[in-house]
Image (cartoon, grey):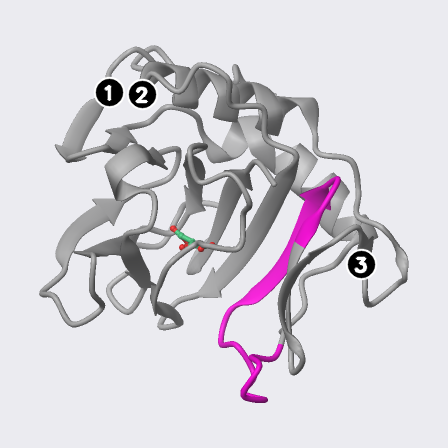
Amino acid sequence: MSDLFTDSANEIEEIQQDVYILRSFTSYDSLIADVKAVTTVAPFRFMYTPGGKKLNISMTNCGDLGWVSEPSGYRYAAKDPTSNEPWPTMPHSFKRLAIKAANKALFNDFNPNACLINHYKQGRELTAHQDKNEPDLSQPIVSVSLGMSARFQIYGDSRNNKALEIELYDGDVMVWGRSARLIYHGVKTNRGIPHPILGDHRINLTMRMV
Ligand SMILES: O=C(O)CCC(=O)C(=O)O
């Protein structure tokens, strides 16, 4: 396994107020063993929206609580509804990475207990949404990109705004919070550049305090 943090792990750029990017902060090689350990116990699955529509990316979770979308609504659940077992423990590597990235953006008491893991096949997208099911909105979201590249879209305070688009590559980490905590954001992968090992697949970890 390679080092969790790369040589460029000190550089942080504020791309919009309270939205930060840490380019090449980590890598597929340093996290994939832990991703596989989690997804072996809690495999990726397609969830359904409250409207009954199948989501077009598959997801799973690790940590004390996992984000679940079901016909009855969105919630954080202590147990995986597929197995009725607790979600796998959040790997130490995920937590260390998220805390270090959050610290760079001056979120000094971030201690994530929930990690949503998204899997995108090329062409799949996540439409504009807010992350607002977490009780303490003073805590940021830390989002790690692995594999194929993707376009992250920042719409700001309305999904009707024109999006600022940021290309995300393997190992890039984004942090958003404070005035940007409830930004509408989405992801497109139709022009994703394949990764040498993951090919046209992308994995995203979003760490949250719930
Ligand atoms: O895949 C990404 O880069 C972001 C994922 C996301 O927006 C979410 O899980 O709420």
In the rendered image, which residue does mark 3 sit on?
A: 80
SS at circle 1: loop
Instruction: Compare marks 2 and 1 and give the one earlier in the sequence.
Output: 1
**Could you tell me which quadrant the N terminus lies in?**
top right
Q: Nearer the viewer, residue 6 or 91?
A: 91
Query: Mark 2 and mark 1: span between their CA atoms?
Result: 8 Å
In the rendered image, which residue does mark 2 sit on?
A: 105
Instruction: Compare marks 1 and 3 and give the one earlier in the sequence.
Output: 1
Q: Residue at x 74, y 44 (%)?
A: 38
Image quarter of residue 68: bottom right
Asked whether residue 51 is drawn in magenta, I would say: yes
Q: Is residue 5 visible?
A: no
Q: Is residue 141 visible?
A: yes
Q: Nearer the viewer, residue 36 or 199?
A: 36
In the rendered image, which residue does mark 1 sit on?
A: 12
- At which x and y percent is residue 92? 68, 22
Query: Mark 1 and mark 3: span between their CA atoms?
Result: 35 Å
Lateral position of residue 108 relative to residue 31, left or right: left
Image quarter of residue 60: bottom right
Question: Mark 2–mark 1 contact, CB under 8 Å?
Answer: yes
- The mark lying in front, picked from 2 and 1, is 2
Question: Mark 1–mark 3 contact, CB under 8 Å?
Answer: no
- At which x and y percent is residue 52? 59, 89
SS at circle 3: strand
Q: Which residues are magenta?
A: 48-66
* Amino acid type, residue under disc 1 in the picture: Ile
Image quarter of residue 34: top right
Q: Residue at x 53, y 56 (%)?
A: 118
Lateral position of residue 78 relative to residue 196, left or right: right
